[in-house]
Image (cartoon, grey):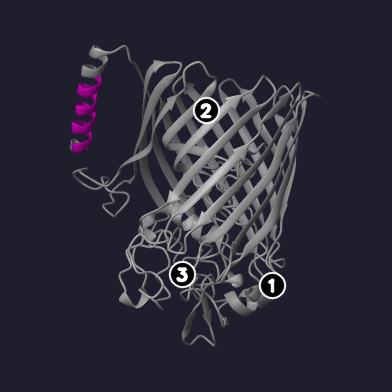
Amino acid sequence: MKKLATLLLATGLVFSSVSGASAIDFKVKGEWLVSFDYGQNGAFTGGNGKTGYGSSRYEDEFEAQQRLRFQIDAVASEALSGQLFLEIGRQFWGSERMGSNGGALGADGNNAVKVRRAFIDWMPPQTDLKIRMGLQGLALPSFTTESQIFNDDVAAVSLSYKFNDNVTLTGLWMRPYNDNFNNANTATTTYYPNSNYMDNVDMGALLLPLTFDGVKVTPWFVYAGIGPNFGDSARKLGDSGSFTNATLGTSAGQFRSGMFPAGGMFHKEDGSSTDLKWPTSYGTAIWAGVTGEVTAFDPFRAAWDINYGSSTWEDQGRLNRQGWLASLLFEYKLDWAIPGLYGWWSTGDDSNPANGSERMPYISTGNTNNLFSMYAGNGAPWNHTREGVLFNSMAGTWGIGVRLKDMSFLEDIKHTFRINYMGGTNSPTFAKRYLSGKNEWHDDNHAANEGGLGRDPLYMTTLDSAVEFGLTTVYKMYDNFQVYVDANYIATWLDKDVWGKSTMNGSNDDVRDPWNVNVTFVYSF
C-alpha cells in the first residue's frame, strides 16, 4: 500500500501541474468492494473428502477479499478526452500468493495494481466520427444475457459514426494477443524459427445498431486471424502441458477453452504416448449475430440474441469448431417486480472428435454479467471469484428459467429470485470415450471437468442436468453505499455411466452440489 500511495501522490502532482498549463477537466470515479464468501464444492468435489471451494483455485470454504477500482477522466472538450482505469486487487485477506498479493501481514503486496483501461477519445474536426484508441472495455451486442462470445478489456481502435437517430455504425480493430511466443525449444525451429513468430491474434468487427420507436435491432459481424503460436510463452514440442502459458491470465484461459475442441491438440492412444497435432498455419474465425428487443407494448418486453461462430485451421481439421447459440427473454413490468421467463439453446459436440467441435467458439466473457445466471454462469458484477461454476459461455448447453427481478417491499431494498433448469447438448458417447476417467484421449491428463483446453468448468452431455437456485438482495444504505447479499445453490445430476465415480479432479468422491453465500459492501464515488 506504500507503493500505491506513492503512485497516487505522483499522479496527483502530475495532474496538478498539467491542469495549471491547460484547460483540462479531471474527473475521478471509483469504487471500493469488500467481499466475504462462504461455500462448498465449487469444483463439484474437492477430492478425498475435501470440501473447499475448488482445488484448482486454492480457495478455502470461507474467503475474505477486497478490490479497488480507480478511474480518472481527463476531458479537454467534447471532441478530446482520455481515461485511465486502475484496479487494485483482488486481495485475499491473509494471502501473499501471486495475483492476490497485499493481503498478508504488512500489506505490502507489489503485484496487485493493474491497468484495466487506458485510452483516448477524439473526433476529427468538423465531423461526427468518434474514435477511441487504447486499452478499452468492449463487448459484442446482447439484449438478453450479455455477450456469451466476447466481453473483456482489450487493446483496440474503435470508430463510431451516427448517421441519424435511427442508424449508427461501429467498426473495431482488436489485438488480444501478440509477441508472447518465446520458442524455448530448438526442436521447433523447423516450423517456428523465431520468437514472436506467427503468434498474433487480430480481430475486426462491424456493428450496426438500429433504433426505432419501441424496437432495437443490432446485426453484427466479427472476423479474426489466429496465429498458431498465440499466447505461448515457451513451447516444448511434444510436451502436453505447454499450450499457452497459464500466467497469461483468465482471458487467456477462456480463449483456450472457447476456441478449441475438447482435448485440443493432443491425441492419446490407450493413455500412453502423446501424438501432438499442432497447426502450422494461421487459423481464421468468424462470428455473426442479430440481437434486439421490443418495448413497444410496454410494460411487456421481449428480447432475443442469435449468435453463430466458426473457427477453422487449414492443416488441422480436427481443431475446427463451429456452432449456434440462441436465447429468448419475455418480461412484464409490475409495480413491485418484473417477472421474466427465458430460455437458451446451443449446439453441442457429436461423438466424432475427428471432425472437430460442434460447439460455438467464444473469445472471452471476462466482463460478462450473465443476466440469466449469477452463479452457474459469469453473472455477478461484484463477485468475480465464485461465479462461472458451470460455464464461462453457454456454448454446449441449453436451459429454461424464471425470475422475479427487482422485487421491492421495503424502501431501498430490492430482491431478485431465479430458478434455472439446465442441461448439456454434447454427446455422452464422446464424453465417455474421450473425456472420462476411462478415456483414451484428452489433454494433459486433465480430469473430465477440470476446465482444461477446449472445455468450460463442467462439460455437460445430453444425459447431464442441473438446477440453479439464486437469490440476490441489494440494500441501498446511502446514495454511494450498497450492500449485496447473494445466495446460490446448484443441484447436479451427472450421468455415472458416462463419468464414473473418480473423474472429478482425480478424486474418489461422488459429485457434490456446489453452493455459495456472498456478502459484498460497495462504496462508489
Q: Farthest residue to the front: give it.
A: 126
Spatial CA span between label 2 and label 1? 44 Å
Q: Which residues are magenta?
A: 3-15
The answer to whether one can see residue 57 in this image is yes
Residue 375 in the image, given as x and y percentages of width and height: 56, 48
Q: In which quadrant of the rendered image does the C terminus lie? A: top left
Disc 3 secondary structure class: loop
Label 2 packing within 10 angstroms: few (<14), some (14-19), many (20+): some
Residue 127 in the image, given as x and y percentages of width and height: 53, 19
Amino acid at circle 2: Tyr
The residue that disc 3 covers is 49
The residue that disc 1 covers is 428
Spatial CA span between label 3 and label 2? 37 Å
- Total numbered labels: 3
Q: Farthest residue to the right: give it.
A: 297
Residue 444 in the image, given as x and y percentages of width and height: 46, 74
Q: Nearer the viewer, residue 85 or 179?
A: 179
Residue 326 in the image, given as x and y percentages of width and height: 72, 48
Amino acid at circle 1: Pro
Q: Nearer the viewer, residue 506 or 475?
A: 506
The residue that disc 2 covers is 475
**Is the C-beta separation of discs 2 and 1 under 8 Å?**
no
Q: Residue at x 56, y 22 (%)?
A: 412
Tell me if residue 451 is in the magenta stretch. Answer: no
Q: Please tell me the numbered disc located at residue 166.
A: none
| Number of the front mark, 2 or 1 | 1
Relative placement, left or right, of 72 versus 498 is left
Nearer the N terminus, badge 3 or badge 2?
3
Q: Residue at x 55, y 52 (%)?
A: 224
Spatial CA span between label 1 and label 3? 27 Å
Amino acid at circle 3: Gly
Q: Is residue 238 above or below residue 3?
A: below
